[in-house]
Image (tube, helix red, strand yellow):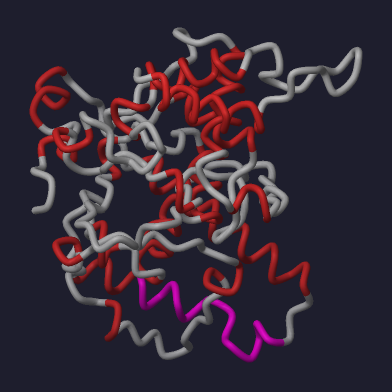
Amino acid sequence: MPQIVRASICGIAAVLLPSSPMGAQDPAPGAQVSAVAAAELYADACAPCHGRLGEGNGRGAARLGSPEPRDFTVGVFKFRTTPTGSLPTDADIFRTIARGVPGTWMPAWKDLLSEDETWAIVHYIKGFSEFFAIEDPDPPVPLPTPLEVTPELLSEGRLVYTVLGCARCHGTSGRGDGPSAAELTDDWDREIVPYDFTRGGYKNGSTPSDIYRTLVTGLDGTPMPAFEPDAVVFPGDPEGDVTSLSTGLDARTAEELEAYLRHQPTAEQISAMDSDERERLAQHRLWALVFYLDALQRPRRWWYRLLVEQPELTREKGR
């Protein structure tokens, strides 16, 4: 690396990485790694894809296709525990580096970097965006204890999936082939692929709690919204009118949806609920959706892994 570039990078890192512990018994995570070492770690592990200045334009980025490497300078991160529109916590960035992003070229570094080295890279990455210097992340969204999985809850999850419009992008069977799939772009006008839920191996974690977190925080920078309580507490319809929801549904599912909406609280009943009742209704529907998505995963045999597990990695950049 040219000396002038190394000096500039180390200058950034020197600001971010304290040279002395915050307290005798409680050193800052990553403080044991020098600014120079942090710069070298980033240059070796991250810069080939994310670029030496964190703009997502490393020398290997052009060959990666979709999804493209993250541009750290804009301060927009998909994988967070914080609400949509918020910066991630340091722990969020650490988790993504350590665990990687399944189904993409972003590997898991947990067995290649020490904990201190990973923390050093976390702080180094934050130096690329001015937002980390002027804003604090919002508190993480609470993760409640999952409900018990039942056949009834799974069945309801399929109907919640329909009412919330998930099929428009992800398709009626969750394979990422909805009618809007071919038209989706991210915030930078780049083509983006809806996730095929049958693949499993979710990028933001695959446990029910991980899926719940993704639903309530959204994936910033993409068309995937955060399902906040007001969106999930949709009203029923005593008439069971599913005209606007029935596109692509088979007759049996349409009938089940009609019956479901007839028995859900009406708009008037919802407006009369107190905050605890609304929260219970939102949680019930969110966990129903979580368990339904989790149940869509199918066993990934060798031929599936070889041929269709990672379609994003085979797409040409710019298509």
Query: From the viewer's perspective, is 146 left or right of 304?
Result: right
Query: From the viewer's perspective, is 28 left or right of 196?
Result: right
> Where is 186 relative to 230, above or below?
above
Q: Is residue 267 magenta?
A: yes
| Residue at x-position 52% and y-position 39% | 210
Q: Position of residue 123 (x, y in %)?
A: 60, 31
| Residue at x-position 45% and y-position 59% | 156
Q: Position of residue 185 (x, y in %)?
A: 25, 62
* Farthest right residue in view: 24
Q: Quadrant of residue 280?
A: bottom right
Query: From the viewer's perspective, is 260 left or right of 139?
Result: left
> Where is 149 relative to 277, above or below?
above
Q: Quadrant of residue 106?
A: top left
- The span shown in magenta is 257-271
Q: Position of residue 281 (x, y in %)?
A: 63, 66
Q: Position of residue 55 (x, y in %)?
A: 36, 43
Q: Quadrant of the N terminus?
A: top left
Residue situated in front as seen by the camera: 297 or 39: 39
Q: Is residue 226 magenta?
A: no
Residue situated in front as seen by the camera: 154 or 101: 101
Query: Can you see residue 214?
Result: yes
Residue situated in front as seen by the camera: 127 or 200: 127
| Residue at x-position 14% and y-position 62% | 182
Most common secondary structure along the magenta stretch: helix
Query: Can you see residue 151?
Result: no
> Where is 195 relative to 126, above or below?
below
